Amino acid sequence: MKNLRILTVTLAIASVIFTTTSCKDNKKEQNNVSEDHSEMNNDNSDGHHDEEKKEIAMSGNQDGNAESVLKDYFSLKDALVSDDNEKAKGLGTTLAKSFGNLDTSKYSDNQKTELKEIIEDATEHAEHISESDIKHQREHFKILSKDITDMVAITGTATKLYEQFCPMYDGGTAWLSTKEEVRNPYYGSQMLKCGKVQREIN
Amino acid sequence: MKILKVIAIIALVVLVGIQFVPTEPNQNDVTPQTDFMLVNEVPIAIQNQFKVSCYDCHSNNTNYPWYNKVQPVAWFLENHIKEGKAELNFNEWENYSDRRKNSKLRSIIKQIENGEMPMDSYTLIHRGAKLDSLAKNEIINYMNNLKIKN
C-alpha cells in the first residue's frame, strides 16, 4: 500500500513536469514555425523577384509583383466559376502568400498606406477562402474583388481587364476578369452568364 | 484486474496533474481607448447585448465560467478565445483601417444574420447570449449604419 502511494506521488510529479515542459515545447515549436514561415515567405519573394525580372525583361515596364497577385486572383476566380471548392481553398493560400510578397517600396507614402491596408484586408479574405465552404468563399471573394480593384488603381497592370457586374448577388457585386465574356464566379454553373461588363481597365 | 487498476490510477494522476498546468487568463482591468464602445455611440441595449454575446471571446476581457478552473476545459476555452480575438477584437476596433472595419462589419452582419455567431456551443451554456430576431435586427441595422461609405 505504501509502495502504491509512493508510486502515485511520483507519477503525479512526473505528469506535472511532463505536461508543463511539453507545453513549453509546444510554444517554442509554434515560434519556430512562424519563423520558418517568414523565411519561407522571403524565399518565395525571392522567387517572385526572379519571375519579376523575367517578366520585366520580356514585356518591359510592369510590376511583376502586382501581376502575380492578379494572376492568382484570376485562378481563384476561375475555380469559383467552376464551383471547385477544394481548388479555391488552395488558391486562397497561394493568393495570401502573393499578397505577403507584394513590394510597395516604390510607391508614394499615401499609396503605401493604402496598399498596406488593402494587403491586410485582402490577405484575411484570402485566408478565409482557404478554409471555407464555397458559399463563404464567394462572400469573401466579393470584398477581395474590391480590394484587388483598388490595388490595380494604384499599381496598374499590363493586361486589359474587364470589371464585370452581377446585379443579383448580394445587392449587386463586381469582379475582375481578363476576358470580355461573362463567367460568373458568384453563381458558377447555376447562373454562369449572369452579369455584364461595366468598365474596361486599360 | 491489476492492470486495470494501474491504468485507472495513472489516468487519475494525469487528470490531477494537468490541473496544475497554468493557463493565461484573458482578463484586463483597463478598456483601451480604441474599444468599439468608446469610439462609437452605441445604444445601451446593444452595448449590454454585445458584452454578453460577443465580448467573452472578442475582447481582452473574458467573464469566465466556473468550469474554466478545470483542465482540460480551460485549454479548450483558451484556444477558442485566442481564435476569436484573432478574427475580431472589439477592444482594438479603432486600430483597424476603414477598409478592415467595413470588412469586419460585413462579416459580423452576415454571421449574425445566418445565426453562425454567437456560436451554438457558447449559447448552449450562456443562454442570455442567444440573440432573438428582435435583437438581431437591432444589431444588424446599427452595424449597417456604421459602414463607412466610399
Image: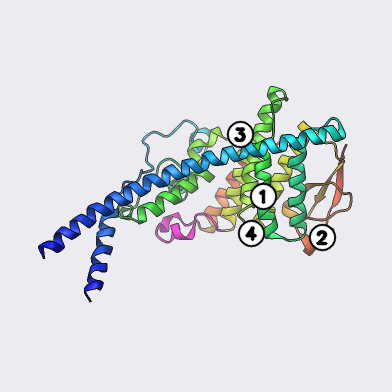
Do the dots labelled 1 and 4 sit on one chain? yes
Q: Pointer 1 indicates a residue of which chain?
A: A
The residue lying furthest to the left in this view is A2
Badge number at residue A192: 2
Whether tag 3 and tag 2 are in contact, CB under 8 A, the answer is no
Residue B16 forms part of the magenta stretch = no
Whether tag 4 and tag 3 are in contact, CB under 8 A, the answer is no
Name the front one of labels 1 and 4: 1
Amino acid residing under circle 4:
Asp
* Residue of label 1: A92
* Residue of label 3: B97
Q: Quadrant of residue A119?
A: top right
Q: CA separation, marks 3 and 2?
A: 34 Å
Do the dots labelled 4 and 3 sit on one chain? no
Q: CA separation, marks 4 and 3?
A: 27 Å
Amino acid residing under circle 2:
Leu
Amino acid residing under circle 1:
Gly
Q: CA separation, marks 2 and 4?
A: 19 Å
Residue at 76 percent across and 59 percent down: it is A187
* Residue of label 4: A133
Neighbour class for label 1 at 10 Å: few (<14), some, many (≥20)?
many
Name the foreground residue: B3 vs A134. Answer: B3
Do the dots labelled 1 and 3 sit on one chain? no
Name the front one of labels 4 and 3: 4
Q: Regarding mark 3 in the picture, which secondary structure is present there?
A: loop
Residue at 49 percent across and 48 percent down: it is B83
Q: Pointer 4 indicates a residue of which chain?
A: A
Q: CA separation, marks 1 and 2?
A: 21 Å
On screen, A165 above or below B27?
A: below
Q: Is residue B16 left or right of residue B32?
A: left
